[in-house]
């Protein structure tokens, strides 16, 4: 994908989710190259995850995003985005996703919503803030104590 300031947030998001599906189908973290996703993220992208989650904290840059995907795959055996609704205006998008997931540590299955605010700058995702309805239920299902809040490169 060639990035361009004229790409709107909806085009970037639909491209990124298609690339993510390809990345996961190719084996995901540790097996598929992050290069499938990298064109959709700004080099200085920032992902803010709720501190109460096993993968909580702030993840920065492509290296941080790649480590985040690895950590997610260590926590979740499956993580399916069953339904998504998009609202995008200019550089800002909001995505409501219904997730079906199975925790690796416990085998427990959950269905839960995530609302993400996403900022797209110069045709790439620059900032992501996911909001979970119940972080305690997710952490409990994963049977992993929450990580101390930390900033991740």
Image (cartoon, rainbow, N blue to C red):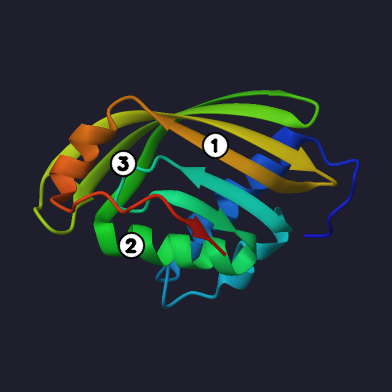
Q: Which mark is residue 129?
A: 1
Measured in 3D between alpha carbons, the distance from the residue under mark 2 to the one under mark 1, in whole angstroms, is 19 Å
First along the sequence among labels 3 and 1? 3
Q: Is residue 42 visible?
A: no
| Above or below, 81 relative to 102 | above
Tell me if mark 1 has few (under 14), some (14-19) or many (20+) residues whose alpha carbon lies within 10 angstroms of its own. some
When asked about the image quadrant of residue 77, the answer is: bottom left
| Above or below, 19 relative to 27 | above
- What residue is at 40 percent from the left and 40 percent from the top? 50
Measured in 3D between alpha carbons, the distance from the residue under mark 3 to the one under mark 1, in whole angstroms, is 14 Å
The quadrant in which the N terminus is found is: bottom right
Measured in 3D between alpha carbons, the distance from the residue under mark 3 to the one under mark 2, in whole angstroms, is 17 Å
The quadrant in which the C terminus is found is: bottom right
Tell me if mark 3 has few (under 14), some (14-19) or many (20+) residues whose alpha carbon lies within 10 angstroms of its own. some
Relative side of 104 to 37, left or right: left
First along the sequence among labels 3 and 2? 3
First along the sequence among labels 2 and 1? 2
Relative side of 143 to 87, left or right: left
- What residue is at 9 percent from the left and 53 percent from the top? 106
Residue 44 percent location from the top left of the image = 71, 58
Which residue, given by chain and number where applicable, does mark 2 sit on? Answer: 73
Residues 90 and 138: in front is 138
**SS label for mark 1:** strand
Which residue, given by chain and number where applicable, does mark 3 sit on? Answer: 52
| Above or below, 106 relative to 9 | below
Residues 21 and 94: in front is 94
Residue 137 percent location from the top left of the image = 19, 33
**SS label for mark 2:** helix
């Amino acid at each position: 994908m060639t990035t361009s300031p004229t790409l709107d947030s909806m085009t970037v998001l639909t491209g990124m989710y298609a690339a993510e599906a390809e990345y996961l189908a190719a084996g995901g973290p540790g097996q598929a190259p992050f290069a499938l996703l990298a064109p959709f993220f700004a080099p200085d992208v920032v992902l803010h995850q709720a501190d109460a989650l096993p993968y909580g904290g702030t993840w920065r840059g492509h290296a941080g995003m790649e480590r985040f995907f690895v950590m997610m795959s260590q926590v979740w055996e499956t993580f399916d985005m069953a339904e998504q609704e998009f609202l995008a205006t200019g550089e800002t998008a909001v995505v409501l996703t219904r997730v079906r997931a199975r925790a690796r540590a416990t085998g427990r299955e959950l269905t839960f919503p995530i609302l993400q605010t996403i900022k797209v700058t110069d045709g790439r995702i620059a900032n992501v803030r996911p909001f979970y309805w119940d972080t305690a239920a997710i952490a409990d299902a994963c049977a992993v104590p929450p990580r101390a809040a930390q900033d991740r490169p």
